[in-house]
Image (spheres, grey):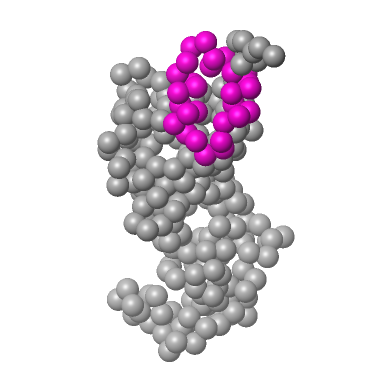
Amino acid sequence: MFFKGTSLGEKLVDLLPQNEIKQAARLLSSCKLSTESTKRLLCKKINHLEIDYTNLTTLTQTSPELILIKEYAGYTHDPSITEAFREAFILAAENTEYTIDAVPIQNTVRVEYKEDNSYEFAISELLPERNQEIILFQEVVQHIAHVFKPSGQPSEEQLKKLFNFKTGADIDHELIGSVIRDLKHHHDGVVQNATQLAFLLLVQSLFPEKDYLEDIKIETADGVNYDILTLPHLYLLPLSFLESAGYPG
């Protein structure tokens, strides 16, 4: 049986190991084989695409990783291919492997409160454990955008969309859930700073039907943890994170 054109390209993708990005990049670079159908199949086939942060600045337009990322960025309008990329991508840095989280990457979040009123919170305060991760992903996107700047494709905006950067700043329930999961996972549900406290109290007042404050605790200056829902006069308590920051109890 002989294959040609699209059939040959699709057969080669079918034979391609799922984590063989060098062969995948070569296939994409072959004008005769890289048809639209072949490209889409290949994007969905790759299940491991890793960038080592220590080698980030050595990556060029001819690097297999960037050839593939450029291809993925051309399909940001297709949720199935975008999802395939986010599931495959790994950023290796400082003995840690970072994946693209379901929660969008952003620096701040804005919470609308009543008419013409809004509050802006820093993600670095709400999710301090994610702060380093956000910085690393920002550097990755900036470098890739710089590499492809002469051609303009992919653009930085395309890359941000691909890497799940949030373009807007409004609150969403995924982010609220992420803050709460972070507190419960890393700190046994204990609020770590005033920004987290203000954020949680505000979103609970906006969405009273949600149980956002369930199992969330406050630590007082004497080291005792209290369930936040049992404290009607919270503002009277000397809180540990305020005292450590130099505020009087």
Choose between 43 and 119: the one closer to the eye: 43
Direction front: furthest residue: 1
- The quadrant in which residue 4 appears is top right
Choose between 181 and 147: the one closer to the eye: 147
> Where in the figure is residue 177, as x and y percent of width and height?
60, 58
Look at the image and tell me whether residue 90 can be seen: yes
Residue 33 counted in the magenta span:
yes
Say which residue appears at 41% left-offset and 61% top-offset: 128
Q: Main secondary structure of the magenta part?
A: helix
> Where in the figure is residue 90, as x and y percent of width and height?
46, 46
Total marks in image: 0
> Where in the figure is residue 38, as x and y percent of width and height?
59, 20
Look at the image and tell me whether residue 169 can be seen: no
Residue 96 counted in the magenta span:
no
Say which residue appears at 45% left-offset and 52% top-offset: 98
Work out which quarter of the rendered image holds the N terminus and state it.
Answer: top right
**Which residue range is magenta in the image?**
9-37
Choose between 117 and 234: the one closer to the eye: 234
Position of 245 relative to 13 (above/below): below
Q: Is residue 181 toward the left or the right of residue 122 in the image? A: right
Q: Is residue 122 toward the left or the right of residue 101 in the image? A: left
Say which residue appears at 59% left-offset and 18% top-offset: 9
